[in-house]
Image (cartoon, rainbow, N blue to C red):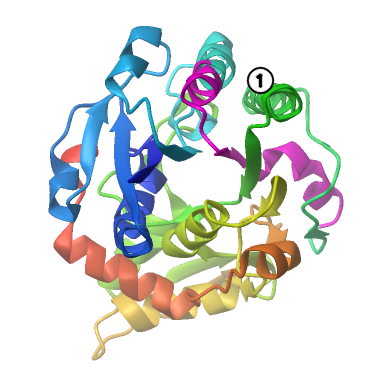
Amino acid sequence: MKKVIIFGATGNVGSYVTKYASEFFPEKGYEVIASGRRNTDVFEQFSVQFIQVDMLNKADFDKLPQEEVHAVILLAATIPSYMDNYDGEKYLNTNIMGTYNVLEYCRKVKADRILFSQTVFDVSLYSSDNPNVVLKPDLPPYFSYSGDHAMYVISKNTAIEMLKHYLAEYGLKYFVFRFPTIYEYSTFQYYYPNGIKTMRPLYKQINRAKNSEPLELWGDPNYAKDMVHVYDCAQMLCKACLVDRETGFYNVGTGIPVTLQEQCQAIIDVFSPKDKPSTIEYHPGKSGGGFLMDITNAKDELGYEPVYDVHKLFEDYKYEEQFNRFKSLRGE
């Protein structure tokens, strides 16, 4: 049976992608295998085999299947939002050398294709110049060479150059996916902007809504961004594993702008007590922090159709919070 291997399966996005893949691929005759640095039995609930692999340890790749590998989904990476103490070398090690090791594994086992993820920060300055710009998938890089994201973007851009080389030299098909914020429930509600542990603003709003406290809306209520649920992201990835193409570069998104007003109201509708719903407090200030994504080619080439609107997205948050299937993978 042909195999689809997911690197980074224990991450926030990777764990939900693995769950989705466990339902998507078996009916099509493919076996899903999850891998990551942390040992876990959490994927047994989806009947998915997990193999503990550190991308920086070449010997670990011998644990993985050596035959009938159809696709590798590479989600493992060092990213700024989870770096509590800045170290640029970690980006180089994981995102460049780790990617190289995965590519070498793909070459040796004659994998058909590799799927690679990066964040939208390689083109982030387009949105800084114009918050209403819709980002096209084929935009050339345009990012800041200063700040805590610079070395991350440089490492990811370098990895993409390696993907091009492996297609030209070995015929390894590659597909790149540019992520904005991917929305999925996590027990761990913090991130590390500039190395400082901070509760994510979204969870602050959700927690306030649960307590019937006012939600603070800063800036223009009509400022809009793309809000993509992790299962829509997973749908795009899974369909790319089967598409009859040599390569592709796709924005992950819904193509449906969600305003700050709509986001706040959806949080209230889903999380606030019905007998005492939160109100919205409006505060002047600069809006920002989101992106609008053009997904036309993902629809045309992959047959992708987003499923989750903003209400359905938060309803799934509420469900996952109660079920909390990945608690053992998350720090407190």
The answer to whether residue 57 shows anywhere in this view is no
Q: Which residues make up the magenta segment?
A: 101-130
* Kind of residue at disc 1: Met
Q: Where is residue 225 in the image (x, y as percent from the top left)?
A: 65, 65
What SS does tag 1 mark?
helix
Lateral position of residue 319 relative to residue 299, left or right:
left
Instruction: State the residue at coordinates (52%, 12%).
Output: 93
Residue 164 located within the stretch drawn in magenta: no
The answer to whether residue 316 shows anywhere in this view is yes
Q: Position of residue 171 (x, y in %)?
A: 68, 31
Q: Which residue is more in the foreground, 304 or 260? A: 304
Vertical relation: 208 (above or below) 204: below
Vertical relation: 178 (above or below) 317: above
Vertical relation: 94 (above or below) 331: above
Lateral position of residue 28 relative to residue 74, left or right:
left
Q: Mark 1 points at which residue?
A: 151
Lateral position of residue 122 relative to residue 244, left or right:
right
Instruction: State the residue at coordinates (55%, 22%).
Output: 107
Q: In which quarter of the image is residue 114?
A: top right
Q: Position of residue 190 (x, y in %)?
A: 37, 41
